[in-house]
Amino acid sequence: MSGHKYDKYFVKEPLGKEGFFPRIIANGSRDFDGAGFSFRLHYITEPGILVKEPHAHDFEQFYFFFNGDLSKYREFHAEVEFSLGEEGEMHLITTPTAVHVPAGMIHGPMNFKRIDEPIIFIDTLLSAQYATR
């Protein structure tokens, strides 16, 4: 501990691994004095299912999908299937994409179906903590 007045605002090594991918994660409840925001960055290098069941949250969520090599930010060499809405409307993501999931909206599953080159998937929550209902 360096003993600086504002040390609590810095989260060192917010790193982890979940299932088939490494991630960077910061939760408002754990890391930021209960701030209403959480962030997860996933580096996806192989196919896999991230979200298996449809669900909803009491908070807004924003997803971002883009090339793992930012020098090729316009390219996207992957296919991600993502279901949105009560009727399970399936979307196929094949280009860099941002998705807004309003609070209460059913979403999932999310299947990283084909990964020809690594992609980055960012999941941001307007909540201090991840919880489903």
Image (spheres, rainbow, N blue to C red):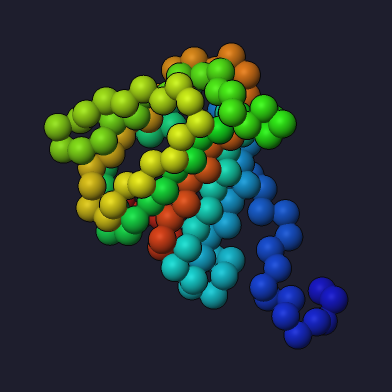
The answer to whether residue 42 is above or below residue 79 is: below
Outermost residue on the front side: it is 74
User: In the rendered view, does 4 fall on the left or right side of 70?
Assistant: right
Q: Residue 103 at x, y = what percent?
A: 27, 55
Q: Nearer the viewer, residue 117 or 35?
A: 117
Q: Nearer the viewer, residue 69 or 105?
A: 69
Outermost residue on the right side: it is 2
User: In the rendered view, does 108 fall on the left or right side of 2?
Assistant: left
Outermost residue on the bottom side: it is 5
Q: Residue at x 45, y 22 (%)?
A: 94
User: In the rendered view, does 99 fall on the left or right side of 14?
Assistant: left
Q: Residue at x 55, y 23 (%)?
A: 76
Q: Residue at x 23, y 42 (%)?
A: 106
Can residue 21 be seen from the camera position used here?
no
Q: Residue 129 at x, y = what percent?
A: 43, 60
How many numbered badges does the structure rendering display? Answer: 0
Q: Residue 93 at x, y = what percent?
A: 41, 25
Image quadrant in which you'd find residue 75:
top right
The answer to whether residue 4 is above or below residue 70 is: below
Can residue 90 be seen from the camera position used here?
yes
User: In the rendered view, does 47 fall on the left or right side of 11?
Assistant: left
Q: Residue 112 at x, y = what percent?
A: 46, 23
Image quadrant in which you'd find residue 80:
top left
Q: Quadrant of the N terminus?
A: bottom right
Q: Residue at x 43, y 55 (%)?
A: 125
Q: Nearer the viewer, residue 38 or 130?
A: 38
